[in-house]
């Protein structure tokens, strides 16, 4: 029986700059396949049919303080790279990496209190690009303007080719 891996430490890079000591938590994008309900003659309940795309991807993070770059970057497209160190019960190390690119859509500085931190929540909604790697193997790659690859499936790329759009 194996032990589940846990996140031991992480770092976040916003537009190439390290947020070590500043980033407190990150909510990674949730993958949700778009579906339509289908019910036809003889069926007793609807079934979900995938339509070949995903719901909009979002990444959010909480930082101990907002930098000038974060506050003036609202509305601009920025790259974010999350790198996490995973450890299991047998002291075996692994790596989780998530790379996204999209607009910084919100900076919520919350409530300011005397002698308290000024945590800021940053949101990136409608990501243009998402890639998830585990132990250096790319498992998920989604280009909102192109195709999606989940494992070895290239359904998105194949659908685009069928309608005359070639993606390399």
Image (cartoon, rainbow, N blue to C red):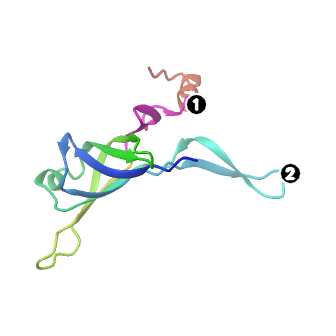
Position of residue 135 measured from the top left corner of the image (x, y, whole percent): 41, 35
Query: Can see residue 76?
Result: yes
Q: Rounded to the nearest whole Å, what is the CA distance between mark 2 and mark 1?
A: 29 Å
Q: Nearer the viewer, residue 144 or 31?
A: 31
- At mark 2, the secondary structure is loop
Position of residue 152 measured from the top left corner of the image (x, y, whole percent): 55, 28
- State the residue at coordinates (38%, 51%): 7
Q: Nearer the viewer, mark 2 or mark 1?
A: 1
Q: Is residue 3 left or right of residue 98?
A: right
Label 2–label 1 contact, CB within 8 A: no
Q: Nearer the viewer, residue 87 or 83?
A: 87
Circle on res. 83:
none
On screen, residue 15 above or below 137: below
- State the residue at coordinates (46%, 51%): 30
Question: Residue 145 colored magenta?
Answer: yes
- State the residue at coordinates (49%, 50%): 4
Start-end of magenta stretch: 127-155
**Residue at label 1?**
155
**Residue at label 2?**
41
Position of residue 151 measured from the top left corner of the image (x, y, whole percent): 53, 33
Choose the circle earlier in sequence order: 2 or 1: 2
Which image quarter is the C terminus in? top left
Q: Is residue 167 left or right of residue 105?
A: right
- At mark 1, the secondary structure is helix
């Amino acid at each position: 029986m194996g032990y589940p891996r846990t996140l031991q430490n992480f770092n976040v890079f916003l537009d190439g700059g390290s947020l070590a000591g500043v980033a407190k938590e990150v909510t990674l994008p949730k993958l949700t396949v778009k579906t339509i309900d289908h019910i036809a003659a003889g069926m007793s309940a609807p079934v979900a049919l995938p339509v070949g795309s995903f719901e909009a991807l979002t990444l959010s993070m909480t930082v101990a303080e907002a930098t000038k770059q974060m506050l003036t970057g609202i509305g601009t497209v920025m790259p974010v790279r999350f790198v996490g160190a995973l450890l299991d019960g047998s002291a075996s190390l692994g790596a989780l990496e998530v790379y996204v690119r999209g607009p910084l859509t919100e900076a919520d500085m919350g409530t300011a209190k005397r002698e308290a931190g000024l945590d800021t929540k940053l949101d990136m909604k409608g990501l243009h690009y998402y890639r998830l790697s585990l132990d250096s193997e790319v498992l998920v790659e989604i280009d909102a303007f192109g195709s999606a690859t989940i494992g070895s499936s290239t359904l998105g790329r194949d659908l685009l080719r069928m309608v005359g759009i070639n993606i390399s």
